[in-house]
Amino acid sequence: MALLYPNSPCCSILSLIGVFMAAVASMAAAQLSSTFYDSSCPDVLTTIQTAVQDAVNQEARMGASLLRLHFHDCFVNGCDGSVLLDDTANFTGEKTAPPNNNSIRGFDVVDTIKSQVEALCPQVVSCADILAVAARDAVVALGGPSWTVQLGRRDATTASFSTASSDLPSPLLSLSGLISAFSNKGLSTTDMVALSGGHTIGQARCVSFRNRIYNENNINPSFATSTQANCPSVAGNGDDTLSPLDVQSPTIFDNFYFQGLVNQTGLLHSDQQLFNGGSTDSLVSTYSTDMAGFFNAFAAAMVNMGNISPLTGSNGEIRINCRTIN
Ligand code: HEM
Ligand SMILES: *[C@@H]1O[C@H](CO)[C@@H](O)[C@H](O)[C@H]1NC(C)=O
Ligand SMILES: *[C@@H]1O[C@H](CO)[C@@H](O)[C@H](O)[C@H]1NC(C)=O
Ligand SMILES: *[C@@H]1O[C@H](CO)[C@@H](O)[C@H](O)[C@H]1NC(C)=O
């Protein structure tokens, strides 16, 4: 397998669409509000927070998985719950697109939250908003920063396998490719670096970093050797074996991911691109020594990401079951 994800090549039309979508996103974002459910479902936030805390207590990695679900939702036609739709006999959604297949997880936790929220306030709270709140609560549960989540997103009645395949960034991207992938969604390079700090928690499969640990030079040699022990060099062997994205503290949301990049222990090619002699080196250095600075930037960037092209007003629907349209 030469290409990890068969991303379509970027072109200027795509960049223009990105700028256009960013403009649409900022217009629609004005319709989101932190008080959206205050009268229609006053207990929704504490209900989600308790369910996320329970899930993280059972398995710390679930916090990482929930954070990633919100990211993979927002980067594919906006934060609209599209990532949650199951494939059916006559519908192919996003779950089997290469960046997601055998990789994204947490759907059972989302189902549990959704059924609790439906019991509280039937057909009021969207699946897209549940993902946005759960992502924040997961970060807090693992020791990270908090922020006020903007609410009022509605759920898509469709999903896109092809956009999930093309718009979710591949771990093989260069720094300029990463900058473009985020700017196409209206996010700055600072947002991109801060959001990459989400890799301070969670795990990746051998298939996602094999080439890096065997063939790259900008890697700490003892880190390469120890990681190789869990990821055989021959493709097809141990592809699904996991390694932590932040080798120092994979279940704590801290700034050690950035310390790791300075130490050349970034697990993914894309991670180490952020500290490889390029324009983002200074930001990585800063975050590696300034945890509060990273936390502030991460919180702001999560709000920006959550504002990507939401469905509001009478667009979309409030799904009853996050896996299916009504
Ligand atoms: C900058 C571009 C990014 C790339 C190329 C990227 C790529 C990846 C890859 C390849 C994995 C491992 C998947 C696997 O092997 O199964 C992963 C995991 C993860 N990503 Fe990213 N990612 C990026 C940005 C983000 C962002 C913006 C967030 C959230 C703010 C995020 C959160 C996570 C988390 C938490 C995990 C671990 C999930 C788990 O353990 O279940 N990533 N990412
Ligand atoms: C898909 O099949 C289901 C029944 O299995 C049907 O209710 C639904 O309308 C079909 N959807 C489309 C888009 O054809
Ligand atoms: C998803 O993964 C399964 C199991 O590894 C595989 O059989 C299937 O072909 C993959 N789907 C796509 C669309 O790549
Ligand atoms: C740098 O990485 C090596 C190899 O993983 C590790 O032993 C060492 O503790 C790391 N140092 C710092 C300062 O992170």
Image (spheres, rainbow, N blue to C red):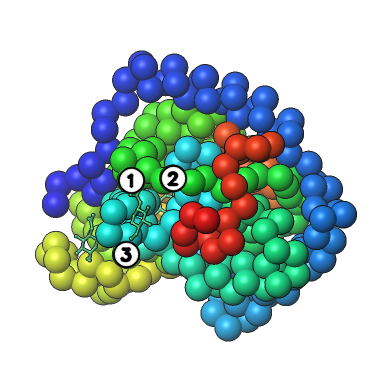
Are discs 2 and 3 less than 8 Å apart at CB? no
Amino acid carrying mark 3 in the image? Asn
Q: Nearer the viewer, residue 23 or 9?
A: 23
Considering the numbered disc 2 on the image, is that residue within a helix, a strand or a loop? loop
Q: Position of residue 237 (x, y in %)?
A: 16, 70
Q: Residues within 10 Å of mark 1 (few under 14, many from 20)?
A: some
Report the image quarter containing ligand 2.
bottom left
Q: What residue is at 26 percent from the left and 46 percent from the top?
A: 5
The answer to which quarter of the image holds residue 135 is bottom right
Identified by mark 2, the residue type is: Thr
Q: Which mark is residue 102?
A: 3
Residue 286, label in figure: none
Q: Circle 2 sits on which residue?
A: 158
Earlier in the chain: of badge 3 and badge 1, it is: 3
State yes or no: Cβ of the residue under disc 1 lies below 8 Å from any atom of ligand 3: yes
Asked if the residue at label 2 sits under 8 Å from ligand 2, the reply is no
Q: Amino acid at mark 1?
A: Phe
Up-down: is 268 above or below 49? above
Query: Residue at label 1?
Result: 161
Reading the chain from its start, which is encountered first: label 2 or label 3? Answer: 3
Q: In front: mark 2 or mark 3?
A: 2
